[in-house]
Amino acid sequence: MKFSQKIVAASSALLFVTVSLLSVQQLSTVQSEVENLVNSSLNEMVVGVKNTVSSEMESKKSLAQSTTEVIEINPQDQDYVKMILEKPNLKSSFLAVGFGYDSNGFVIENDDGWEAGPDYDPRVRPWFIDAKSKGRLVVTAPYVDVSTSNVIISIGTPVKENGKFTAGMFYDMELTGLADLVNSINLLDAGYLFIVTDDGTTIAHPETKNNGQKLSTYMPEVQIKEGVQNIEMNGSTFLVQFMKVPSENWYVGAIVDESIAFSAIAKLRNSSVIYTLIGVILSVIVLTLLIRVLMRPLGTLNAAIQDVASGQGDLTKRLDTNTDAEFAELAKGFNQFTETLQNQIIQSKSIGHEIMNGTEMIVHGAHESADAMRSQLQELEQLATAMNEMAVTATEVANNAQGAA
């Protein structure tokens, strides 16, 4: 890997880590804020519904209690009781209101669509038994009305005469109003509200088929207790919150799909990943182009070194030192090197010329010595010839002298 590529890789890695850390920190902050906002909004909605339900129930119980107290003025007068039960405010507030004597089980009611049959005995009904045994206003557990299939509760009150239990009254409440209330609440387009009793019986639910059913039949993972809990259902994670209704064993519940409620966080996370990758890619491209420009003096230096190394370089050329400080130092060093090398080559060439001249002089001297030696050899040959002639002459003289003797 080239040095420039290493710089690009290291810079890109550093940028990626930095942007990733910033994205994670930003995502964590936004997630915390969104979770707080969702939990706060959810809590406000649940509290609002809880207060509304509590207020509605208290007003119904107050009306039932006040009506009972009015009837206690003359409970034995059936016409008087009937007149009170037919009051418009009672008929509009309750599904049905009835009065049952403890002595004979006789029933007086104001429901135009229902008439107690001969086999109907109010004294065995839960509202009558609880009101008589407890001696105060009671609220029955929710139950499904056979005729309407709606969830109903009954408020039971004891009717006393001179402090003695005389009769029991029931005030039937249809809980469709509560269902309409919870259905009207928009939980961030991600969930809904519902109301259940402490034993899990559903009082109000957006899906009417669940009314009267146990919560465990359609939300088996949920525990009925105040607070927030997370559950897995149908492959998704849900946020569930319960808040108890004061004076009633009821809970207002809220369920929210986290994937929808926190979709902004998911979008932010995806955007962060995409923009981080785009940023890194653009950075790699820009850094590559930038480093090519910045490393151009180094490329020139490399070409010059290659030129010198090839043996065909022009040592008179010099690199431009008018550049970045780091490359200027390299250029100065290279220029100094080539100048020194050039001087050494010049000196070597001069010495070579001197050696050549000395060699030529030696060769010339050798030639002259050879000529002198040839000349001396000729002279020696001549001397030898003369000496030989003299020897011959001497021999002849000697022979002549001997002959003369």
Image (cartoon, rainbow, N blue to C red):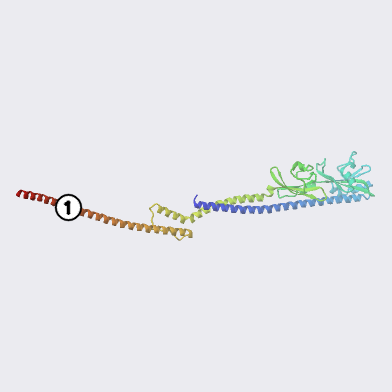
Residue that lies at the very extreme toward the front in this rendered image? 405
Q: Residues within 10 Å of mark 1 (few under 14, many from 20)?
A: few
Label 1 sits on residue: 380
Q: Is residue 300 left or right of residue 275?
A: left
Q: Amino acid at mark 1?
A: Leu
**Residue sitting at the far top:** 119
Residue 142: percent from the left, percent from the top? 82, 44
Residue 129 visible in this rendered orientation of the protein: yes
Q: Residue at x 64, y 50 (%)?
A: 267
Q: Position of residue 33 (x, y in %)?
A: 68, 54
Q: Position of residue 43 (x, y in %)?
A: 74, 52
Estimate the x, y position of residue 213 in percent, counting from the top left: 78, 42
183 to the left or right of 351: right
Question: What residue is drawn where x is 28% and y is 55%?
Answer: 359
Q: Farthest residue in the bottom direction?
A: 322
- Is 80 or 298 nearer to us in this picture? 298
Secondary structure at numbered mark 1: helix
The residue located at (69%, 48%) in the rendering is 258
